[in-house]
Amino acid sequence: MTTRLRTRSAAAAFFVLAAVVPLTAAPAAAATDTTYLDEGYESTPATWSTDWFDSAIGARNRITAIPDGIDGAGIKVTIPRDSNFGSAMRWEFAANEETEPDELFYRYWLRIPVGFANYGQGKLPGPSGLYSNSGRNKIKPSDANPGWSARMMFTAPDPDRSTTSTQIGYYVYHRGQPGSSGETEPWQDSPGVLEFGQWYCVEGRVAMNTPGVANGILEGWVDEKLAYYRNDFTFRGSSDTGINVREFWFDTYYGGDAPAPGSLSFDFDELVLSDRRIGCGERGSGFRDTGGNVHASNVDKLAFAGITKGCNPPDNSRFCPDDNVSRGQMAAFLDRALDLPPTQTDFFDDDVGSVFEANINRLAASGITLGCGTRAYCPNDRVTRGQMAAFLTRGLSLPTGGTDLFTDDDESPFENAIDRMASAGITAGCNPPANDQFCPYNNVTRGQMASFLARALNLPTPPPPPPGYTAPAVPDGYDAVVPLGWSIQDVIEQQPPGAKILVRTGTYLRQEIRPKAGQTIVGEPGTKLDGLWDYTYAFTDIDNPVDGVTISGFEVTRYNSVAGTGAIHGAGNNWTVSDCIVYDNKYNGVTVSNGGTISGCRIYNHNYEAIILTDVSNVTISNNEIYDNGDSSKYQAGIKLVNTANVVISGNIIRDNAGYGIWGYTDNTNTVYSGNTITNNWRGGINHELSYSVLITNNVIKSNGVAPTSPKPDNLYDAGIVVRGPDATITGNTVEGNYNGIGIIGYGLDAQTGRYGPLKASGALVSDNTVTNSGQSGVVTDGAPISTGVFTDNGYFYPNDTSDWFRDGAGGPRTWAE
């Protein structure tokens, strides 16, 4: 065993803007790690493989040396056509006089050669505990066959990328797997899809579970970017006290059972096994395109200081050091570097719509730029080295220095600025070693800009991060980012009210998020919060209401939401919930309070309503799809309102719910139901009862009241539209194929009052609707009929004359007389 100081590259800490600790961060105090194996493959395979079990080079281990590894020599593993095996050897801890650990970190470099064929799925090296026949060969671990394995895997990505890349992940045998074969766990597309012909740093971590408890962890990184995290594995049962990490299984295998239809090969280098996070060194951290660049160290300094975020948002995995700098980009660099104060003045006309407009205006307000013409900045023009000298001289207020320090700037209007910058040690010239020229008319590259700014600001070298910590890049427009596997709440706590936070794609298990006031929390496409039935809320402020929160872009599932509150539950004012997919939660999907908005969501498969609003006002529910909610044994709905005012429900698709489509139940006033499509709900389409003023307009309401209950009510319920209360305007709706058509129900209300006064059915107007094949329509009252003018200018289309009955308390059924 060797113990060494292993420092991960300082570049890994580039993007630290706040000290956010991921769920799996290792203790920061540790300065050394135990390295079980550090294999650089500099000797022949026959030499380095002597410490490995089942390592004979031949039919199961087709390994050759290559000269172009990531650092010196490496190895190539080949799976021949009509075979499954490329390698099968195992490095066993006990055989190498090491105690079998409960936790293991590993790292190797992997290159998929150009021309690789994505025939199908296969295995790559990873940790295992092969104590019996389980963990392989379609044998699920059990008390009789204890063990586990967590090899890496390769598989084809989506078809558009299958000719240029391969996706990696885990292939896991564990007690909780659904079948006899191992469970496939692909890593996130970015960074888990590897382009052919490039070296990638692949890291993994396994932490054994408490025996019998589903809390085992697998984690994975590519180029120090978190690509996978899951923490509910059962690698060992309650009696498996001797099951640990037994070996590292260098398994390269095609399939499955069927052999490879063609030859496949993989290149490996620099395998390390350790008890702590290893990292990738200079080649794998920070930006992927700065390795070997003369400006790399200064790019590191700029990124660490927050002056640059990268050139390919949202991933920002590259810096593009050889690209030219535009005047707009220069403004952003200088604005961040100098922390310029804000301004309300718009100095230029040609930067409208530019992402750099605010930066440009701050530069102008600070006197750093005069523009390129009358009210013009030319944000897309390239910056020359002479112009850059002027920018920096003004921005840094550089003192007068030597004169005529270069031979090629005598005719340049920027000669004085160039000399001042050179005197300050910010530039040495452009023609080493003589450096008697400045090249003032050459364009500035992003790499050169990094060096100029790093020297000008005397930026420090980034410190190494603590073991186990990789700081994320923060895309433009956001204040923080949450990589897969991190605690979203930890990041929120590090950010102030009003911050905008991006949550990266992936599944986040058992997380309950409590935002601060004004925060915006955005999930990338495919970002899922899975409560696993262990948590009540995905997002909530129920204990400490906060206002102005925006939640967007999340899938939310399997939360034990309490009846009357949603898995997303905003108790504060002015919450916005948009573009979310909310499904399979226990009771309700989404709830908001005063001033809230729910829009663009899909909400389905809840035991109660998808959306419920209680004691709120000024809420808008628009353009959602709401379906398959409710329990047929209870009175429920797709959307339910209780004690609300000024609620607008518009443009939604509401279908196939076990209850009403929309149910306004008790003391709702000034309600608008407009432009919705409401179909195939078990009870009625819209039921607004024991409530007040309502406008029901321009809805398409079809095939509601389809519940298989018998007998059907003989009172106009289960209709396309039912109102039970005063002041209803029902106009311009299409009502077709419902159990009943449109009903104003007044019986039992003449002497009844509610929150806003008498509930007697009065003041109704039903006009310009089209009612087709929908049972009965009309008015039901206790005594004297409502004026016959209630129903005017409607169109009725029935298959016979027995369906279109008008009903009231004055004498029972009669034909229509509008």
Image (spheres, rainbow, N blue to C red):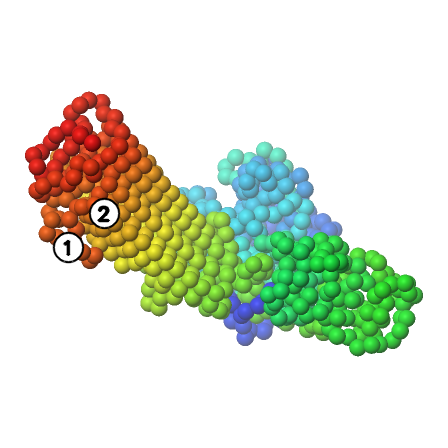
Where is residue 160 drawn, in percent x and y? 58, 38
Q: Nearer the viewer, residue 788 or 226?
A: 788
Where is residue 50 drawn, in percent x and y? 63, 55
Side of 519 where 303 appears, left or right: right
Residue at horizontal 34 percent and vertical 38 percent from the top: 698
Label 2 SS: loop
Which kind of residue does numbered mark 1 sit on? Thr
Residue 747 placement: quadrant = top left
Work out whether mark 2 precedes mark 1 in sequence or the reverse, and give the earlier one. 2
Where is residue 425 drawn, in percent x and y? 80, 73
Residue at horizontal 63 percent and vertical 46 percent from the top: 195
Side of 237 where 318 appears, left or right: right
Label 1 SS: strand
Does residue 198 appear in this view?
yes
Q: Nearer the viewer, residue 734 or 64?
A: 734
Asked if 29 appears above or below 440 in the picture, the reply is below
Residue 109 placement: quadrant = bottom right
The alpha-carbon separation of the residues under discs 2 and 1 comes to 14 Å
Q: Which mark is residue 753?
A: 1
Does residue 625 appear in this view?
no
Which kind of residue does numbered mark 2 sit on? Asp
Pointer 2 local density, CA inside 10 Å: few below 14, some 14–19, many at least 20: many
Quarter of the figure that contains the N terminus: bottom right
Residue named by callout 2? 727
Where is residue 91 drawn, in percent x and y? 56, 56
Residue at horizontal 25 percent and vertical 53 percent from the top: 668
Residue at far top of view: 800
